[in-house]
Image: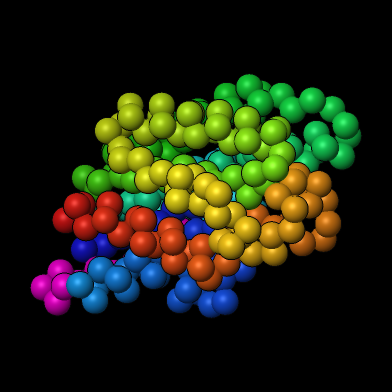
Amino acid sequence: MLYTALGDSITYGENASSFAKAYPQLAVSALNSRSRSHRVTGYVLARPGWSSYDLLHAVTWKGSSAINQSDVVSVWIGGVDLANAALSSLKNQQPLAIKQILTPYKRNLHAILSHIKSESRAHIICCTQYNPFPNSPLAAASIDQLNYTINEVAQSYNAKIAPVHRWFEGKQAALVYGYRNGKLEDALSLSLPIHPNDRGHQVIANGLTPYLVTSY
């Protein structure tokens, strides 16, 4: 079984203590420890800073061969689309135009899932986005709308939904690397407290593994 994980810095493993501690590798290790008859190989196509447009470009031009051979593909993207706009809004003290962000995002996510469907028979899992700033109403409302869009697009392709936001809800202080006050203003410092720490990656892997098991 080949499992391909598509995404941005979270999937890449930013702020994990090692790449082996990032959730895709942890999930693959967990699956291989469960069964000797079903060996799982993992492939990651993700980079820090990738928006949905960047991932679409990478999937189209770099990922087709891996996707074509994949049995299951997870897609986790959208945090960068939202974060860039939110930080710009915060710095310029302007309202966040969430619809202007989600319209191109939705188009890109449609194109990513459509490409996967056209290239392979892989089962698709779409991951929702957790909120690293639970004490900011703006972040909560924006991420809720992002996750609504993810659900809407995923359902149109019969993709499964991995509700990562539920796994992190109320536990962000323990699961997010560098967590401080849980407010958007925390992101204005040099370090962005948005990625999972090792414990957070383990929570994601634990939650995601059952979705992968049912895919083979």
User: Is 33 positioned to the left or the right of 50 in the image?
Assistant: left
Image quadrant in which you'd find residue 102: top right
Q: On the image, which quarter does residue 152 sit in?
A: top left
Residue 95: give x, y in percent of width and height. Answer: 79, 25
Q: Quadrant of the C terminus?
A: bottom left
The range drawn in magenta is: 35-45
Relative to 87, residue 1 above or below: below
User: Could one spot residue 14 in this view of the protein?
Assistant: no
Residue closer to the observer: 94 or 140:
140
Residue that extends furthest to the front in the rendered view of this protein: 170
When the figure is inspected, residue 62 is found, relative to residue 52, above or below; the finding is below
Residue drawn at point x = 40 percent, y = 70 percent: 25
150 vs 34, left or right, is right
From the top left corner, tell me how far across and down residue 154 is, in percent.
Answer: 37, 33
Kindly tell me whether residue 147 is visible in this rendering.
yes
**Based on the displayed image, in which of its 4 quarters is residue 94 positioned?**
top right
Q: Residue furthest right?
A: 92
Residue 135 at x, y = what percent?
70, 42
Q: Residue at x 83, y 51 (%)?
A: 188
- Looking at the picture, tell me which residue is in the foreground, 103 or 174: 174
The quarter of the rendered structure image containing the N terminus is bottom left
Q: Is residue 139 left or right of residue 211?
A: right
- Residue 46 drawn in magenta: no
Image position of 177 (left or right of 75): right
Residue at point 37%, 50% (across, down): 74
Residue at figure coordinates x 51%, y 51% from the top left: 168
Image colouring: rainbow
The count of marks equals 0
Residue 3 in the image: x percent, y percent? 30, 60
